[in-house]
Image (cartoon, rainbow, N blue to C red):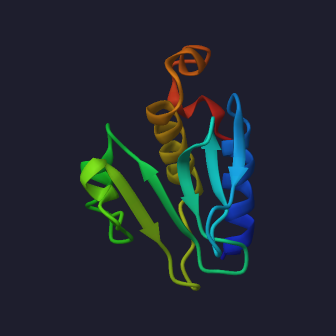
């Protein structure tokens, strides 16, 4: 099993590679990713079971069919945000969650930054 902290670290590094992406921790137990102060991924803090929330305007309905996914709380689910929560024994699907980060970044970032990215969402796997 991959450690949740290892997966979280890989997801964070992946998200921070996007243009103007930065860390943002507005609340305890959060280690979020943002672009120009607009959050595009809510991540649980290190040492906690992995939880990630992303805005998924294209794949959100499909994502909600997965057993670990649900609409994000605080009304964000009504705007296309999906939260994946994993038990300590679970192995989170790294490539799928990278796709979610990519989709969420593209949905939240300014159009000029998105235009600078290659069109294939899966180009950054690895």
Where residue 12 sits: x, y (%)?
A: 70, 53
**Total marks in image:** 0
Where residue 77 sits: x, y (%)?
A: 30, 57
Where residue 114 sits: x, y (%)?
A: 54, 21
Q: Give the answer, above or below, for where 71 lies relative to 20.
A: below
Q: Quadrant of the C terminus?
A: top right
In the figure, is residue 41 to the left or right of 19? left
Q: Quadrant of residue 17?
A: top right
Where residue 113 sits: x, y (%)?
A: 60, 20
Q: Give the answer, above or below, for where 95 lies relative to 42.
A: above
Q: Give the answer, above or below, for where 25 lies relative to 50.
A: above
Q: Is residue 2 visible?
A: no
Foreground residue, 84 or 92?
84
Foreground residue, 115 or 91?
115
**What residue do we see at 57% from left, 85% from top?**
89
Q: Quadrant of residue 4?
A: bottom right
Q: Give the answer, above or below, for where 38 lies relative to 86.
A: above
**What residue do we see at 50% from left, 76% from top?**
86
Foreground residue, 125 or 53?
53
Q: Quadrant of the N terminus?
A: bottom right
Q: Quadrant of residue 69?
A: bottom left
Q: Is residue 50 visible?
A: yes
In the figure, is residue 88 to the left or right of 16? left
**What residue do we see at 74% from left, 60% from top?**
9
**What residue do we see at 37% from left, 44% from top?**
56
In the figure, is residue 36 to the left or right of 108? right
């Amino acid at each position: 099993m991959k450690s949740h902290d290892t997966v979280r670290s890989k997801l964070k590094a992946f998200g921070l590679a996007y243009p103007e992406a930065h860390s943002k921790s507005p609340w305890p137990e959060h280690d979020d990713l943002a672009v120009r102060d607009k959050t595009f991924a809510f991540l649980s803090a290190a040492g906690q079971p992995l939880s990630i929330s992303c805005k998924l305007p294209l794949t959100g309905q499909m994502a909600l069919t997965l057993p670990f996914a649900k609409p994000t709380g605080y009304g964000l689910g009504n705007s296309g945000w999906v939260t994946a929560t994993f038990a300590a024994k679970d192995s989170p699907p790294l490539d799928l969650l990278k796709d979610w980060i990519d989709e969420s970044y593209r949905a939240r970032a300014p159009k000029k930054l998105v235009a600078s990215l290659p069109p294939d969402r899966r180009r950054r796997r690895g």
